[in-house]
Amino acid sequence: MNIISKLTIRHLLENKKRTIVTILGIVASTALITAILVGVFSFFSFFGSINRLTDGDVHAVYDKLTWEDVQALENDSRIKYAGVVCTDPTITGVRMFTDKEMRFRVGNIYNGGGDIYKQLVVSEYDGKLPETSDEVAVEEGFLKDNSLDLHVGDTITFELGNRYEIEPDGTKIYYGGSYRSEEQFEVLSTESATITAILHGNRPTKDFDILRGMDFGTTVGLDVNGDSYLDCRIALKKADSTSAVQIQQIAEDYGLHIGDMNTEFLISVFATKGMGGTYIQFFTLMGIALLIVIATSVVLIYNAFGMSLTEKVRYLGMLASVGATRAQKRSSIYFEGLVLGLIGIPLGILAGCAGAAVTLDFLGRKILESDMIAGAEGMRGAIPIIVNPYVILAIVIVSAVTVFISAFVPAVKASKIMPLDALRQTNVVKMKARRLRVNPFIRKIFGYEGELAYKNIKRNGFKGTVIVFSMAISIIMFLTIDFFNNTFLKLNQYEIDLPFNIYVSCGLDEKDRLKEELEALPEVERVVSADYVTYLFKDHDNKSDFVPANNSFLNKDYLTNDYKALFDNLDGVMVILVDDEDFDKLLNENGINPTDYHGKELKGVILDSYLHTENGKPVFNESIIGQKIFYDDPENNPPVVEVSGIVKYKEDSYVCNLVPKNTVDVYVPVSMYYEKAQEHLDKTALSYTYGVFPTGSEEGLVSKISDITTYGGYTNCVVQDLSQAINAMDTVSLMLNTAMYGFTILLTLIAIANIVNTISTAVHMRRQEFAMFRSVGMEEKGIKKMLILETILYGLRALFIGIPVSIFLSFLMFNTIESKVFAFELNYPMYLMMVVAVFIIIGFSMLLSASRIRNDSIIEALKCDTM
């Protein structure tokens, strides 16, 4: 170890506090980078493993093949498995020779050869998988449904054909999946085959009851376009980030058509090249998040190296005076970064992995409990953390680059230090006398301590700029991310807060009897109207018989300036049918007379909130009153609704939450709606929907309600339990919020550490200055007053920079939203909280740092080398 390295180590040990804070900064930034990369890798790897349970070991499908194409794929060195499938719908139906009901006898048969069953069968099974056309594997459940006591080695006989239905225009529609009572069966032949395997619930082939082998060269039919029904499902030998490129290259090599790519698997191995833009956007966002982390970390670590350089100016100058070269002085800073990185990066990786493990454990349990993942229903536990060596290498590289960038500028400055300037400290303070002039009002208001504080900020030069810059960056980062989070919450379609989860629909003439029976249940607290009718202006399903509502309602003049774009992409208006009593209560709370809404015309009130937020900016102006929502042809369409009032959103009102946010809602009394609806609609076509408020737990309630509707003589009842769907959406929302707010909190901690480190180091370096003030009689009270005034001045400067820039960046971010259906709003309480927090953090850091040097010896402090 040379003299430069030894001095650097000694300097780090002598400045333990700053060294520890810098290491913690590196640990925090590395931990955040690790949590992002390891968390994302583990999450997608988990989905990849679930995908195999759901879809089998299939990475892509090439369709419309010849047997020569199949042979070429089987011989390709890049392919591990090549499974052949005949997709001809005319030979996918089977019917058993049993006396069971038709829904048990009719099933589906899968015709495949090659490696297909090695790829698709992932469950346990008895026997061996079929290979030729006279061998089959049968689902155990299918045998039980047909009361067939067959085992491996036995022969099974069935009718082969297709399941179909004839459309009114004569088109023949082929069926698969569950049996339908209206379907027909066309018998093509009677087949017998040997059972070589019995399956026990194989999910990739869950829609098929029999898996049949296929002989090479079998004649395969052609579709209406003359294309072959022969497909090949492949699995690659080298399944990694190049998988998508490999799949496309194989298609090019043999002139094949890619029928499908297993995007769920490909994304799990980060094979995004050549895939859809959605996945690219996701990784772009992840890259942006990493850049934010790196930028914030660079500011923190750069400040630490900058302060370190200021502290080492004198001894670097002395080294220069005895012949140290520029490269040696520069290497001092790089070596310091190396030492700190060797300590901080491994600790950060460990902390990040621990954080990712805790997060995935928490979110994983929520995700699996919600049964929202197809293929993982019933699974419980946590998402396992996967520490991939390549991911760790990427983390080390990114973290090392972060440290290097942070040290680069200080290292360049260190190389330029000259002996005379270093000994005289002219590189630290470069200030002309006229720039230190102080406004007389400062002296009059704050006294001479205020004048000293003002001059000190000016003469601090680089150190003062670093403090202000650090705080301004922290303010900008926090407020901008807060705006992003709030904007995301507004756009988050998964955040749904419905007042109840159980809905029961019935015919209009059955509603009173059903309500009485529901209210009689001890588990039911209240039953209310919970139906709505959507007046559609646009059709995204391209239905040939679609008739839009009259779009005269979609006039931008009815909107406030903040919501002028609301009607640009509005599909429809939701007219919500509310119990008369609750409707009148809503109107009374908004100062509207309910009497006018129970007359001859159907009148309603419009909710003046698109985002379901109390005290938000208004959406509609008074000109919306009197406008009507209607269809030009009243026959067989909902009745005309006149908007006669505007009501405010209340979070604790169940009426205001009957439908999710991001909708335009009009409330009408339920009795008036059905009275008018029957004028143009057949009463038998009208249904009535109740929402059920339970007294406590909903467990078992759905089953009791189903018994009432099933055995109570009702002819047209439907029971819906949205608990699982809402739970899944809540879980998605929780995942997104956890990612956003966890990211924000960690960045905020890094920013606070940045400010505290910068200020405490700056105060420590002013030991000589404070010793001089004490030597001329200044009391501790005066020093504290001076520091408080510096706190105010530093804080004001940082806020004057940070707040306008954050507003500007937030506005730019707002303008990137394609559909701006809501107003640009700032979180004013957060801005106020930020102002208070800035002064608290700066003041606390300054006073705490000053208290640590309070007992310094004046003589020893004046002899100290630090400035």
Image (cartoon, rainbow, N blue to C red):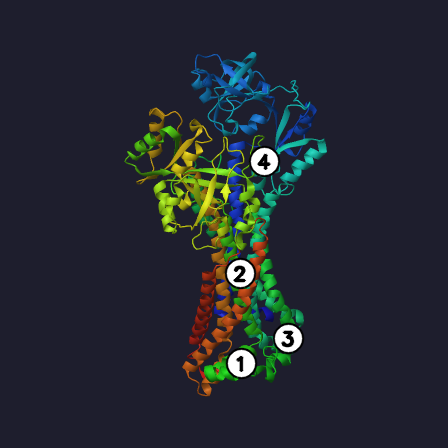
Q: Which residue is mark 4?
A: 262
Q: Earlier in the sequence, mark 3 or mark 4?
A: 4
Identify which residue is drawn at 42% across, 28% down: 683
Q: Is residue 143 above or below residue 768?
A: above
Viewer-side label of 1, 4? 1
- Gap in Å between the C-alphas at discs 3 and 2? 33 Å
Q: Which residue is mark 2?
A: 477
- The amino acid type of the residue labelled 3 equals Ile
Q: Which residue is mark 1?
A: 455
Q: Earlier in the sequence, mark 4 or mark 2?
A: 4
Query: For the view shown, which residue lies furthest in the bottom direction?
Result: 776
Give the structural element (helix, strand or loop) at label 3: loop
**Residue 421's spot in the image, x, y percent?**
63, 80
Viewer-side label of 1, 3? 1
**Which of these two is toward me, 656 or 321?**
656
- The amino acid type of the residue labelled 4 equals Asn
Q: Is residue 568 above or below residue 312?
A: above
Q: Which residue is mark 3?
A: 417
